[in-house]
Image (cartoon, rainbow, N blue to C red):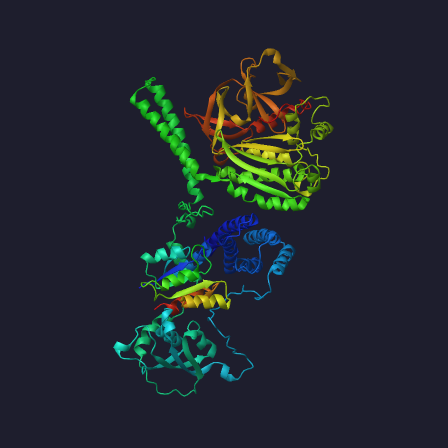
Amino acid sequence: MTQTVLTVDDSRTIREMLNHTLSAAGFRVVTAEDGVHGLDVLQTERPDVIITDINMPRLDGFGFIEAVRGDAAHRATPILVLTTESEPEKKARAREAGATGWIVKPFNPTKLVDAVRRVAA
Amino acid sequence: MDPMEAIRVTFFQECEELLAQLEEGLLAMEQGEHDAETINSVFRAVHSIKGGGGAFGLDPLVRFAHVFENLLDQIRGGVTEAGHEVIAALLRASDMLADHVSAARDGGTADEARSDAIAAALVALTEGEAHGGDEAAPAEFEGLSFTPMTVALDEEPAGAAQAAWIIRFKPHASLYNKANDAVLVLRELGSLGRIEVEVDAEAVPLLDAMDPEGAYLDWTVRLTGETDEAAVREVFSFVDEDCDLDIAAADAAPDAAIDLLSSLLAIGTAGAEAPPLLAPAIEDIIAAAPAGAPGKAETAPAKAAESAALPAPQTIRVDLERVDRLINLVGELVINQAMLAQRVMESSGAGQASDVNLALADLEHLTRGIQDSVMAIRAQPVKSVFQRMPRLVREVGEAVGKRVRLVTEGENTEVDKTVVERLSEPITHMIRNAIDHGLESPADREAAGKPAEGSVRLTAGHRSGRIVIEVSDDGKGVDRARVKAKAIEKGLIAADAVLTDEEIDNLIFLPGFSTAAAISDISGRGVGMDVVKKSVQALGGRISISSQPGQGSRFTMSLPLTLAVLDGMVVSVGDQTLVAPLTAIVESLKPRPEEVRPLGPDNFVLQIRDVYVPLIDIGQAMGFSRTRVDPTEGVALLVESEGAGRVALMVDNIQGQRQVVIKSLEANYRPTEGVAAATILGDGRVALILDIDGVVTANRRVANRRDPPAREPLARTGT
């Protein structure tokens, strides 16, 4: 059965690249532009994996992850954080918020798909 | 188009938006708005440009953006104050970033020296460089506390690929809380080689004492296969802080293992095959995508910067070609409707109140409505052009050593896409001119009691069916004595010519005119204002100037709202019907016999009040009739042409004024001198649209063979 990935990123370019890479790997992709939009989409979608950026308007990655982990329907959904930042504090904060894993941009398509497959049950 | 190409196009489109967002935010900060959202918006713009740039390997861009981002991160974190100096540096950086983007997009290189200089300035403003070095290298997966496992060459063979590993892995509850699972980890280990797994379930309590989210299992895995420790640790990179982990090399001899979970792992190994590489899978994507990828409609709420309270209007992206086709069709619709109306009128013998006529009136009304709506689709706010001006003002101001403030108004005024794109050049020239020639130096300004900072105002608005753009400055105004002297010196006007102030001001539009004592590089060699006038007229517009000495000047440019339709005067010449663009016509008159004077054997001039203008018989000039029309029988159209001043065109009579849909002759036939385009009238006949300048130029060529051109005194320009 096709698995669904929700990608949350405010950059159109990144959304398209993720879509491109994940679709080619056989995933169904749904997108959101920021944390608030992401939560909206989660009202009607049950993705198998979520990929989110950190820096976004309205609700950033940290806030989004916390909200998802607090939502009974999605708290067990793996969340991968996708961002160019690699400072320890940001990573730690993402972990504390409940992130499952971490991918640094610019992403290598093969490794992106590997990571998604790794965490997708 | 190759999908990566399409995404690259998207990236550069996004960069345009992000650069605009960046500049807007920085300008707001300059005005004193230091709220978190503005600063964050600025940070995110640079962050996103860097992110996308990295994905495409645009190294110089990414390197610069990295330094830029660092400083912005510190500002948003409150570590660095965004004072006046800092913001000035940030604005320069944003200009440089824009250059990097352009260079990356067009395959050129940005000015490295300038880039390095600005980058150094940014670094200097950044408190301590905690993170030196690029993050630009494409990254691997990083464990959240990944200790780079040294599989160094000088190490013992123990660091190299081992035949077997013993791994002890005991998850904590926090591992499950992050939606991870032991089975996923084990599955992944299974992809590295053959595994034998044992679980210690001793700690599992009885059901009534068990916390369903607790962690009670302890796994021991024996992994055989040629893998190094780094690869093994990599598997745990997401979870190593949420478990007890011990990895030890085992001896090569495999033990007999008790595999309690082989069934579970069999499910897991199904997902372990290597993912397909990108390139081969592209075909499917292309096949699935609708023809012409840009045709995909995406709902994107428009960004409403200030008015967060208003619900953002929905927009969609539409392929421009489709819009153009639609506009074309609607143009045909309008023509057809006019033809239908005419036929009905002719055949039914003018039954005014008949049903058919009423229905036709409705049809006309509807058609006009559709035409207006369709034109509105392509209408764009001039904002995209106005947005480039702050940077221009900064650069020109710096180049000539003047302090300038730009005020804009009416940037949401809308105009057809075809016109918007061509506004940039004339506006740029006018602003350059205002700063270079209009504004005084800060010292002069202070001496004159003005603030040292000069101001330039750029406004746009609709006025009687046209768009009016004004560029005004509070500089020294036109130096009339000097302008007049220069014009006389250059032979552009007679020495004893009597001119009103307004006429003198408009002398600056003449080709070859410049009063700049020192021609600074940016304004060129005195071709500034006439180039402006040319571009404006090419758009079917007009430009004029008004000035107060010591107080400033104002340039007013008026343009049609669209280039797809034209206001024209329909005239008869011989058996032909022609259309003359209304904007070029100054007046029309019926000449009296004594006003027509011969000039040489073949030419005539027309006396209009106290001025003589060449008289061109259109019928003859364009080969529609062999005989010259009797000037007293026909109508003379006084037109403004470029380079030849005023000219009178002789036609048989005027049929009326109408708005006509422009049909390209060039695209359908070939370029023809003297003809700009064509249209289809209500009676179905084709009417050529005159290219006034073309006709005049052709006529001059013929006339100049023998006689020098009549030098007419300059008449009042601009209307």
Answer left or right for B638 relative to B324.
right
Hey, which quadrant is residue B481 in on the image? top right
B311 or B366, which lies in front?
Answer: B311
Picture mark count: 0
Asked whether residue B302 appears in the rendered view, the answer is yes
Q: Is residue B17 above or below residue A87?
A: above
Return the residue found at the far left.
B208
Residue A12 coordinates in the image, percent (x, y): 45, 54
B272 or B507, which lies in front?
Answer: B507
Hey, which quadrant is residue B340 in on the image? top left
Asked whether residue B2 appears in the rendered view, the answer is no
Residue at 36% across, 67% down: A120
Residue B528 coordinates in the image, percent (x, y): 64, 36
Residue at 35% across, 87% down: B256
B627 or A6, which lies in front?
Answer: A6
Residue at 61% across, 40% down: B455
Q: Quadrant of the C terminus of chain B?
A: top right
